[in-house]
Amino acid sequence: MEAVLFYVLAVIVTVSALCVVFLRRPVHNVVFMILAMVSLAGLFLMLRAEFVAMVQLVVYAGAVMVLFLFVIMLLNLGPTIFQADAKSARWWIGAVLALGVLTMIGPVLTAVIPRAPQIGAPAAVPEMSNTEILARELFTTYLLPFEIVSILLLAAIVGAVILARKRSTGATKG
């Protein structure tokens, strides 16, 4: 049952990621990106990484996608229109280049990626949950980078609000 759920979630993530790349309307891209993030959170739950799954849902599928939607609405983006002949030529060139890169990288990845451990004695279960381990590391070892990122995010939010406010006040004066 777990393998079936994994394959279903993997197909959903793959198809929605392809839709994010190839659809023309930005709002549809965002919706499929949210679907990919939710499915990815399901994969994290299957790995028994509950905290990472919830962070994936709250931060990425929630906050970041809402910000993307606001940017799309603020910029009033419409569908992208490509010329038919240029688009087909670019698509074929991209497909050939991607196939070439995968052909070159494939053997390297199979040599570098470690093999799954053989079935044997189960690994020792840590006494603390993964949430406790992550919190301990975050607030001891990585406290300074955590605080720097929070200040950068605050500055980005303030800057976005100021830019949006100047645009809206400038449009009403003219």
Image: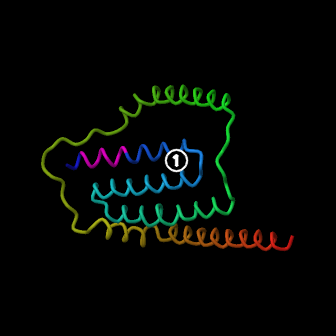
| Tag 1 residue | 20
Residues 8 and 131: in front is 8
Residues 96 and 91: in front is 91
Residue at screen point 36% across, 71% down: 136
Residue at screen point 59% across, 27% down: 93
Question: Main structural element of the magenta stretch: helix, strand or loop?
Answer: helix
Left or right: residue 170 versus residue 151 is right
Q: Residue 16 at what x, y percent from top left?
A: 45, 47
What stretch of residues is rendered in magenta?
Answer: 4-11
Identify the secondary structure beneath mark 1: helix
Instruction: Using the rendered view, name the quadrant where residue 159 is placed.
Output: bottom right
Image vertical order of residue 37 relative to residue 107, above or below: below
Q: Residue 30 at what x, y percent from top left?
A: 53, 55
Q: Residue furthest right?
A: 174
Disc 1 crowd, CA 10 A, few/some/many (<14, 14-19, 20+)? many
Residues 63 and 124: in front is 63
Tag 1: amino acid: Val
Image vertical order of residue 157 relative to residue 85, above or below: below
Q: Residue 138 at what x, y percent from top left?
A: 42, 69
Residue 9 magenta-highlighted = yes
